Image (cartoon, grey):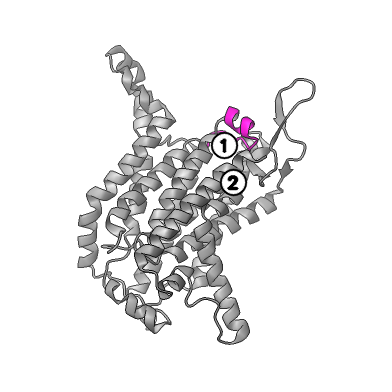
Amino acid sequence: MLYHLYNLLRDWLNEHGLGFFRVFSYTSFRIVCALIVGFAIVLLLGKPTIRYLLKLKVGDNPEFHNKDLNELMKKKSNVPTMGGVLICGAIFATTLLLADLTNFYVHMAMLTLLWLAAVGGVDDVLKLTTARRGLGARDGLKSWEKLQFQLGLSVLLGLFIHHHGQDDATQMAYSLNLPFMNSWQRDALSGDWVPSDTLIVLAPWVFVALTVLVITGASNAVNLTDGMDGLASGIVIINSIAFIILIAIASTESYAKELLVPFIPHAEELAVVCAAMGGACLGFLWFNCAPAQVFMGDTGSLALGGLLGFIAVVIRQEFLLMVIGGIFVFEAVSVILQVGYFKLTKGKRIFRCAPVHHHFQLGGWTETQVVVRFWLLSGLFAAVALALIKLR
């Protein structure tokens, strides 16, 4: 909104000595503003929202198939959940305020945010009521029901992103980008940068399938990680910062060529969305750090994971998402291994409890130790991912 308002009033502002408002035309300035505004919105609305959630009696009552863990988590009883409405609301409002609203990728990012926040919201509401076919207060949407909505969104996004890449007349927008693989090379005669001979261009159905895997996987991985005070929100902040850097590289042709990664025109506005996400999570962490006053619930975790996955697909950095989000991958894999091994051995377990953060908690680490150590590892993974950019 401010970006468009400046463009509308640019001549008038210049004539009246107010040309300094041109800073709103710079993406870098709006990224910093988005971080601050996202944080401020959550900070200002946090306490009223928490009071409202308490009034609605949407407190959580964690229940696990582990008596010791239930005892450890008893203190979290009745802490309000669905705090994800704060995060998603702040991201949406900040994006409307500071992003270029004519940008296709911004449209798709907001679709991702609202769609998955709605799915998560319904899941949270069903978990917190006893009205669902008499199945009890802890039954939300079935896994296959959530998966249907996630798959449907991912297919739509994959089709639209692929088609938009064709409109930009660059195959890089739907190529496969792997570590140590160059997207550019020097032309032997002219010396100009040209797309690499080894560039792997994905067929539409392959691109859509990869999009489905990444967005659905990221959404569910963040959801599984959200189980301790400040854990998921802190890691998303680190991921957001890393992706702001990756977006800046991918959307700037000179940087993309220098670092031999795909150049994605018009993707720079996603950095504003990413900054809004980081700022909103930073503000949420104010209330979500131990002892938490509110949990994000599926409303927040599904949307945040899906948004990270969408951004990774657009800038063709699906592999680096797995590195940057290494903790999310670790959490998701721990659940898959635990469930698979349990069924295969008819009752045996690899971990004390899954997701894996509870394994460490039952092993003697305090909740704060688990959270801070996972944050540190997440920062390390982000640094490794950024270093991998140069290894081509």
Classify mark 1: residues with Cα within 10 Å, few (<14), some (14-19) or many (20+).
many
Q: How many badges with numbers are in the image?
A: 2
Q: In which quarter of the image is the C terminus?
A: top right
The amino acid type of the residue labelled 2 equals Gln
**The furthest residue to the bottom:** 346
* Whether residue 114 is visible: no
**Residue corresponding to mark 2:** 317
Q: Is residue 272 above or below residue 382?
A: above
Residue 229 at x, y percent in the picture = 34, 63
Q: Nearer the viewer, residue 229 or 202?
A: 229
Residue 58 at x, y percent in the picture = 28, 69
Q: Residue 250 carries which label?
A: 1
Q: Does the magenta stretch include residue 265?
A: yes
Q: Is residue 171 magenta?
A: no
Identify the residue at horizontal 33%, vertical 75% (top origin): 73
* Whether residue 373 is visible: yes
**The furthest residue to the top:** 15
Residue 28 at x, y percent in the picture = 42, 31
The amino acid type of the residue labelled 1 equals Ala
Q: Is residue 21 above or below residue 226?
A: above
Q: In which quarter of the image is the N terminus?
A: top left
Q: Which of 124 and 244 is in front in this view?
A: 244
Q: Confirm or deny contact between disc 2 and disc 1 (CB under 8 A).
A: yes
Identify the residue at horizontal 33%, vertical 48% (top origin): 90
Residue 24 at x, y percent in the picture = 37, 28
Mark nearer the N terminus (2 vs 1): 1
Where are the magenta residues, as a range?
Answer: 254-267
Q: In this view, does 16 lie above or below 249?
A: above
Identify the residue at horizontal 38%, vertical 63% (top origin): 369
